[in-house]
Amino acid sequence: MTGMSWHAIESVDDAIDATRSFLFPVEVREWLKLALIAIFVGVGGGSGISTVTNVANLPSSLPPEATDNGAAEQLPETLPVELWVVGVVAVFVVLVGLALTILAETLRFVFYDALRTQAVRLREPARRRFGQAVRLFGFKLVVWIAFVTPFVVAGTALWAVGLDAISDTWLLAGLIVGAGTAVAAFIVYSLIIRGTDEFVVPLMVVSDCGVREGWRQFWPVVRSQPAQFVVYIVVHFLLLLAIGIGQSIIGALVFGIVGTVGALVGLAVVFGMFGGLNAAVASTAGIVALGAVVLVTLLVAFVVYLPVSILVLSYVISYEVSVLESADDEFQLFPEPTENDTESTPAI
C-alpha cells in the first residue's frame, strides 16, 4: 500500500473548503435557519432516540408501603389516581420525545439537502424528507431494541432465578462474560448508528431511497475498503476531540464574558432596586428579577455561541460527506465545482 492515499486525511482540508463555500459570504436568513438546525442536529453519531428511552427515569409518586392497617386501607383509594397521573406524564414525555426526535431526524435531512443545493430551505425539504426521517427513526429504534432485548431478557431471568441460587464462581464468570458482551454490543451498535447517520443518510438524500437501500449501497464500499474506514474512525475521533477542546475554550470565553456582564446587571438590580441581596431575596419581586437576569444571561450566551455550533456542524458533516465521496465517485452530494462557486443565491 505504498503511496496509498487515505480519504480520511485528505478530506480534512476538503471539508474546510466545502464549509467555507457553504457558509460564506454570510447570509443572515440562512444562518438563522442553520441555527435552528444546529440546535437539534448533533455530530459524531449523536442521536435523539435516547430522549425516548429516558422515560424509565421518571420519578414515582407512589406512596410507601403501608406499615399499619390504616395506611393499608388508604392505599386502594390513592393508588389508582396516582398511577393515572404517572401514566399521563409518561405518555406525554414519550410523545414529546418522539416529536423532538423525528424533528431532529427531519432537520438532519434538511441539512444534507442544503449542502447538496448550497441553499438553506426548511419547509419544502422538510415536507419531502419527512417520510425518510420517520423510516430512519424506525430503523434506529429497531436496532436499539435488538441490542437491548437480550440484556433485558438475561437480567429478567437472573432476577427470577435469584442470585442466591448461583454459585460465586458462576456469578463472577457470568459478570465477566456479560460485561464483555455489553462492551462488544455497544461498539457494534455505535458503528451501525454512526454508519447510518454519517454515510447512509447522505446516500438516502442522493438516491432518494430508504435506510435499507442506503445500507445496500454503502456496505459493499465498506467491505472493499475496510482500511480506509478504520483510518476514518481514528481521524474522525481525533477531529472531534480537537474540535471539542476548541469548543470548550470558546464556550468558556463566551459564557464567562456574558456571565460577567449578567452578574454586573444582577448586582445593579440587587443594590439599585432593592438595596441589598437580603432584601432582594426576601421579596417575590426580587426573586423574579434575579431569575429574569439569569435566564436572559443564559439565553444571550446561548445565542452568541450558536455561530460556533453552526461552524462545527457544517465542518464535521462536510468532512463526513467528503470521505464518502472519496470512497465512491457515485456518492456525489456536493455540487460539482463551477466558475461561479463564490456566488451563491440566497434561499427563500
Image (spheres, rainbow, N blue to C red):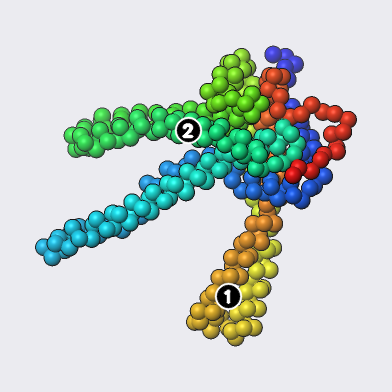
Label 2 sits on a secondary structure element that is helix
Q: Are marks 2 and 1 in contact (CB under 8 Å)?
A: no
**In the foreground, 238 or 201:** 201
| Label number found at residue 218 | none
Q: Quadrant of the N terminus?
A: top right
Q: Residues within 10 Å of mark 1 (few under 14, many from 20)?
A: some
The part of the image, by quadrant, that contains residue 76 is: bottom left
- The residue labelled by disc 2 is 138
Residue sitting at 70 percent across and 37 percent down? Answer: 114
Residue 311, percent from left and from top: 71, 44
Residue 191, percent from left and from top: 53, 29
Q: CA distance from mark 2 to mark 1?
A: 45 Å
Which of marks 1 and 2 precedes in the sequence?
A: 2
Q: Amino acid at mark 2?
A: Gly
* 196 sits to left or right of 123: left
The part of the image, by quadrant, that contains residue 256 is: bottom right
* 90 sits to left or right of 171: right
Label 1 sits on a secondary structure element that is helix
- The residue labelled by disc 1 is 289
Image height check: is 16 above or below 1? Answer: below
Image height check: is 14 above or below 255? Answer: above
Viewer-nearest of discs 2 and 1 = 2
Q: Residues within 10 Å of mark 2 (few under 14, many from 20)?
A: some
Q: Is residue 69 visible?
A: yes
Image height check: is 295 above or below 97? Answer: below
Residue sitting at 44 percent across and 47 percent down? Answer: 95
Q: Quadrant of the C terminus?
A: top right
